[in-house]
Image (spheres, grey):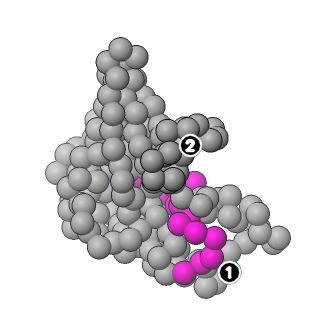
Protein backbone atom coordinates (compact mmCIF):
# COMPACT_ATOMS: atom_id res chain seq x y z
CA UNK A 1 0.00 0.00 0.00
CA UNK A 2 1.22 3.46 -0.86
CA UNK A 3 -0.20 6.53 0.91
CA UNK A 4 -1.80 8.94 -1.57
CA UNK A 5 -3.83 11.54 0.35
CA UNK A 6 -5.45 12.46 3.66
CA UNK A 7 -9.14 13.38 3.85
CA UNK A 8 -11.49 14.23 6.72
CA UNK A 9 -12.57 10.61 7.25
CA UNK A 10 -9.13 9.00 7.01
CA UNK A 11 -6.27 8.22 4.64
CA UNK A 12 -6.39 7.12 0.99
CA UNK A 13 -3.96 4.40 -0.06
CA UNK A 14 -3.13 2.92 -3.45
CA UNK A 15 -2.81 -0.87 -3.47
CA UNK A 16 0.40 -1.56 -5.38
CA UNK A 17 -0.58 -5.16 -6.22
CA UNK A 18 -3.86 -4.45 -8.03
CA UNK A 19 -3.53 -0.69 -8.70
CA UNK A 20 -6.78 0.12 -6.84
CA UNK A 21 -7.41 2.91 -4.36
CA UNK A 22 -8.92 2.26 -0.92
CA UNK A 23 -9.94 4.53 1.92
CA UNK A 24 -8.93 3.68 5.48
CA UNK A 25 -10.18 4.85 8.86
CA UNK A 26 -8.53 4.09 12.19
CA UNK A 27 -10.11 3.79 15.62
CA UNK A 28 -8.94 2.78 19.08
CA UNK A 29 -9.42 -0.96 19.73
CA UNK A 30 -11.72 -0.46 22.73
CA UNK A 31 -14.08 1.57 20.53
CA UNK A 32 -16.62 -0.86 18.98
CA UNK A 33 -18.15 1.43 16.33
CA UNK A 34 -16.52 -0.25 13.33
CA UNK A 35 -17.60 -3.68 14.60
CA UNK A 36 -21.29 -2.67 14.46
CA UNK A 37 -20.72 -1.28 10.95
CA UNK A 38 -19.09 -4.55 9.87
CA UNK A 39 -21.91 -6.61 11.46
CA UNK A 40 -24.54 -4.58 9.62
CA UNK A 41 -22.75 -4.94 6.28
CA UNK A 42 -22.08 -8.65 6.68
CA UNK A 43 -25.72 -9.40 7.52
CA UNK A 44 -26.94 -7.62 4.38
CA UNK A 45 -24.15 -8.71 2.01
CA UNK A 46 -24.99 -9.94 -1.48
CA UNK A 47 -27.93 -7.57 -1.42
CA UNK A 48 -28.07 -6.67 -5.07
CA UNK A 49 -28.60 -3.10 -3.87
CA UNK A 50 -25.85 -1.06 -5.48
CA UNK A 51 -26.33 1.88 -3.12
CA UNK A 52 -24.75 0.03 -0.18
CA UNK A 53 -20.98 0.01 0.39
CA UNK A 54 -18.86 -3.06 -0.19
CA UNK A 55 -15.26 -4.24 0.36
CA UNK A 56 -15.26 -3.36 4.03
CA UNK A 57 -12.43 -5.09 5.84
CA UNK A 58 -11.18 -4.70 9.40
CA UNK A 59 -7.57 -5.17 10.49
CA UNK A 60 -6.62 -5.00 14.16
CA UNK A 61 -3.15 -4.09 15.40
CA UNK A 62 -2.85 -4.84 19.10
CA UNK A 63 0.65 -3.31 19.29
CA UNK A 64 -0.75 0.07 18.24
CA UNK A 65 -4.12 -0.55 19.98
CA UNK A 66 -5.81 0.44 16.72
CA UNK A 67 -8.41 -1.05 14.40
CA UNK A 68 -8.21 -0.10 10.72
CA UNK A 69 -11.19 -0.14 8.37
CA UNK A 70 -10.53 -0.58 4.66
CA UNK A 71 -13.36 0.90 2.60
CA UNK A 72 -14.14 1.41 -1.05
CA UNK A 73 -13.02 4.79 -2.32
CA UNK A 74 -15.67 6.80 -4.13
CA UNK A 75 -15.49 9.80 -6.44
CA UNK A 76 -16.81 12.39 -3.94
CA UNK A 77 -19.75 12.98 -1.64
CA UNK A 78 -22.98 14.79 -2.50
CA UNK A 79 -21.97 17.87 -0.49
CA UNK A 80 -18.74 18.28 -2.48
CA UNK A 81 -20.58 17.69 -5.75
CA UNK A 82 -23.21 20.32 -4.96
CA UNK A 83 -20.68 22.93 -3.83
CA UNK A 84 -18.67 22.48 -7.04
CA UNK A 85 -21.71 23.22 -9.21
CA UNK A 86 -22.04 26.76 -10.50
CA UNK A 87 -25.50 27.34 -8.96
CA UNK A 88 -24.80 25.16 -5.86
CA UNK A 89 -28.07 23.24 -6.47
CA UNK A 90 -29.11 19.81 -7.68
CA UNK A 91 -31.33 19.50 -10.71
CA UNK A 92 -34.75 17.84 -10.40
CA UNK A 93 -33.32 14.80 -12.20
CA UNK A 94 -30.35 14.55 -9.80
CA UNK A 95 -32.58 15.07 -6.77
CA UNK A 96 -34.95 12.34 -7.96
CA UNK A 97 -32.05 9.89 -8.34
CA UNK A 98 -30.76 10.74 -4.85
CA UNK A 99 -34.19 10.40 -3.23
CA UNK A 100 -35.04 7.11 -4.93
CA UNK A 101 -31.62 5.63 -4.11
CA UNK A 102 -31.83 6.65 -0.45
CA UNK A 103 -35.43 5.43 -0.02
CA UNK A 104 -34.70 2.08 -1.68
CA UNK A 105 -31.64 1.60 0.51
CA UNK A 106 -33.45 2.55 3.72
CA UNK A 107 -36.32 0.26 2.81
CA UNK A 108 -33.87 -2.58 2.19
CA UNK A 109 -32.07 -1.96 5.50
CA UNK A 110 -35.45 -1.93 7.26
CA UNK A 111 -36.22 -5.43 5.93
CA UNK A 112 -33.20 -6.60 7.94
CA UNK A 113 -34.47 -4.68 11.00
CA UNK A 114 -31.79 -1.97 10.63
CA UNK A 115 -32.46 1.73 11.12
CA UNK A 116 -29.97 4.12 9.54
CA UNK A 117 -29.51 7.19 11.76
CA UNK A 118 -27.04 9.37 9.90
CA UNK A 119 -28.64 10.72 6.73
CA UNK A 120 -26.67 13.70 5.46
CA UNK A 121 -25.09 14.83 2.22
CA UNK A 122 -21.56 13.91 3.32
CA UNK A 123 -22.65 10.26 3.78
CA UNK A 124 -24.12 10.05 0.28
CA UNK A 125 -21.15 9.06 -1.85
CA UNK A 126 -20.98 9.31 -5.64
CA UNK A 127 -19.45 6.33 -7.46
CA UNK A 128 -18.43 8.36 -10.48
CA UNK A 129 -18.61 11.81 -12.00
CA UNK A 130 -21.83 11.53 -14.02
CA UNK A 131 -25.29 11.12 -12.52
CA UNK A 132 -27.06 7.85 -13.26
CA UNK A 133 -29.37 5.51 -11.39
CA UNK A 134 -26.42 3.63 -9.82
CA UNK A 135 -24.36 6.60 -8.67
CA UNK A 136 -25.36 6.96 -4.98
CA UNK A 137 -23.86 4.87 -2.15
CA UNK A 138 -25.13 5.32 1.42
CA UNK A 139 -21.93 5.29 3.47
CA UNK A 140 -21.04 5.27 7.17
CA UNK A 141 -23.29 2.60 8.64
CA UNK A 142 -21.75 2.82 12.12
CA UNK A 143 -24.82 4.52 13.58
CA UNK A 144 -27.29 1.87 12.42
CA UNK A 145 -29.41 0.33 15.14
CA UNK A 146 -31.75 -2.65 15.20
CA UNK A 147 -35.56 -2.29 15.59
CA UNK A 148 -35.81 -4.57 18.58
CA UNK A 149 -33.08 -2.84 20.55
CA UNK A 150 -33.95 0.25 22.52
CA UNK A 151 -31.34 2.95 22.68
CA UNK A 152 -30.41 4.38 26.05
CA UNK A 153 -28.27 6.95 24.27
CA UNK A 154 -30.36 9.58 22.45
CA UNK A 155 -27.14 11.16 21.17
CA UNK A 156 -26.82 8.17 18.87
CA UNK A 157 -29.59 9.63 16.73
CA UNK A 158 -28.73 13.29 17.23
CA UNK A 159 -25.84 12.99 14.80
CA UNK A 160 -27.56 14.93 12.02
CA UNK A 161 -30.55 16.71 13.58
CA UNK A 162 -31.41 18.71 10.47
CA UNK A 163 -32.05 15.44 8.62
CA UNK A 164 -34.07 13.53 11.21
CA UNK A 165 -37.55 13.88 12.63
CA UNK A 166 -38.34 16.76 14.99
CA UNK A 167 -39.07 14.43 17.93
CA UNK A 168 -35.34 13.72 18.19
CA UNK A 169 -34.23 17.24 19.08
CA UNK A 170 -35.24 17.18 22.75
CA UNK A 171 -33.42 13.93 23.63
CA UNK A 172 -36.58 11.92 23.03
CA UNK A 173 -35.77 8.43 21.80
CA UNK A 174 -36.47 7.77 18.15
CA UNK A 175 -39.16 5.59 16.64
CA UNK A 176 -38.58 3.00 13.92
CA UNK A 177 -39.77 5.43 11.24
CA UNK A 178 -37.20 8.14 11.79
CA UNK A 179 -34.94 7.30 8.85
CA UNK A 180 -37.75 6.98 6.30
CA UNK A 181 -39.67 9.98 7.64
CA UNK A 182 -36.59 12.22 7.61
Above or below 39: residue 137:
below
Q: Which span is picked out in magenta? A: 116-132
Q: Secondary structure at mark 1?
A: loop
- Circle 1 packing at 10 Å, graded few (<14), some (14-19), many (20+), is few
Above or below 46: residue 11:
above
Q: CA distance from mark 2 to mark 1?
A: 30 Å
Residue 42: percent from the left, percent from the top?
Answer: 23, 53
Residue 13 is one of the magenta-drawn residues: no
Residue that sits furthest to the right in the current view: 86
Above or below 128: residue 71:
above
Q: Main secondary structure of the magenta part?
A: loop
Q: Is residue 137 left or right of residue 144?
A: right
> Residue 91 shows which numbered tag?
1
Residue 121 is one of the magenta-drawn residues: yes
Q: Earlier in the sequence, mark 2 or mark 1?
A: 2
Q: Residue at x 68, y 58 (%)?
A: 80
| Residue under label 2 | 12
Q: Residue at x 44, y 61 (%)?
A: 138
Amino acid sequence: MKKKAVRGFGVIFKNILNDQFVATKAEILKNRISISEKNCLSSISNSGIDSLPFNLDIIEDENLSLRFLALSLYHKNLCEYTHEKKNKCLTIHELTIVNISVLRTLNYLNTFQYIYNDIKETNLMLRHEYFSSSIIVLEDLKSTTIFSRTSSNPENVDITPCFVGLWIHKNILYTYTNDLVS
